[in-house]
Image (cartoon, helix red, strand yellow):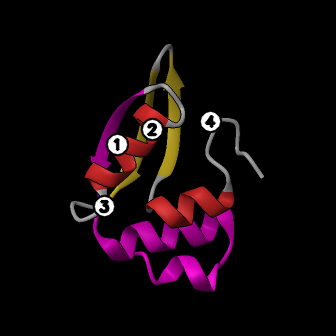
Amino acid sequence: MDHGNGIGRRQAWQFAVVPLQRIGDELEVLSTAAHAARAMRFIERVLGLRPRVRLVSEEALLAVLQERFGFEEIGRAHV
């Protein structure tokens, strides 16, 4: 399921990224320092958008991923 920003549940967990808002060709997202580079490449290459990343702790990202996208056992290994 796509939450309106081009990122579905599977991709959110896989790339450790939570979309916040899209403004023009920019997509503001949450990610961690460890996953930011991979998340940015995904946003640029797959979605064709310019990423704006807000860094959060792994615990905070996991909580938001679970809240917004539900729990995914496979994705948890990536975060």
- Quadrant in the picture for the C terminus: bottom left
Which of 10 and 24 lies nearest the eye of the viewer? Answer: 10
Residue depicted at 61% across the width and 86% down the height: 73
Residue depicted at 73% across the width and 46% down the height: 2
Secondary structure state at the residue bearing disc 1: helix
The Cα–Cα distance between marks 2 and 1, rounded to whole angstroms, is: 5 Å
What residue sits right under mark 4 in the picture?
A: 5
x%, y% of residue 15? 46, 59
Mark number displayed over residue 43: 2
x%, y% of residue 9? 67, 60
Q: Decide whether residue 59 is among the magenta residues.
A: yes
The Cα–Cα distance between marks 3 and 2, rounded to whole angstroms, is: 12 Å
Mark 1 and mark 3 lie on one chain; the one further toward the N terminus is 3
What residue sits right under mark 3 in the picture?
A: 35
- Would you call the spot at circle 1 few (<14 residues within 10 Å), some (14-19), or many (20 or more)? many
User: Which amino acid, mark 2?
Assistant: Ile
- Would you call the spot at circle 2 few (<14 residues within 10 Å), some (14-19), or many (20 or more)? many
Q: Is residue 58 left or right of residue 63?
A: left
Query: Quarter of the image holding residue 57?
Result: bottom left
Residue found farthest to the front = 45
Q: How many marks?
A: 4
x%, y% of residue 12? 55, 58
Check if mark 2's residue and mark 1's residue have beta carbons within 8 Å: yes
Q: Which residues are the magenta region?
A: 50-79
Secondary structure state at the residue bearing disc 4: loop
- Would you call the spot at circle 3 few (<14 residues within 10 Å), some (14-19), or many (20 or more)? some
What residue sits right under mark 1 in the picture?
A: 40
Mark 3 and mark 4 lie on one chain; the one further toward the N terminus is 4
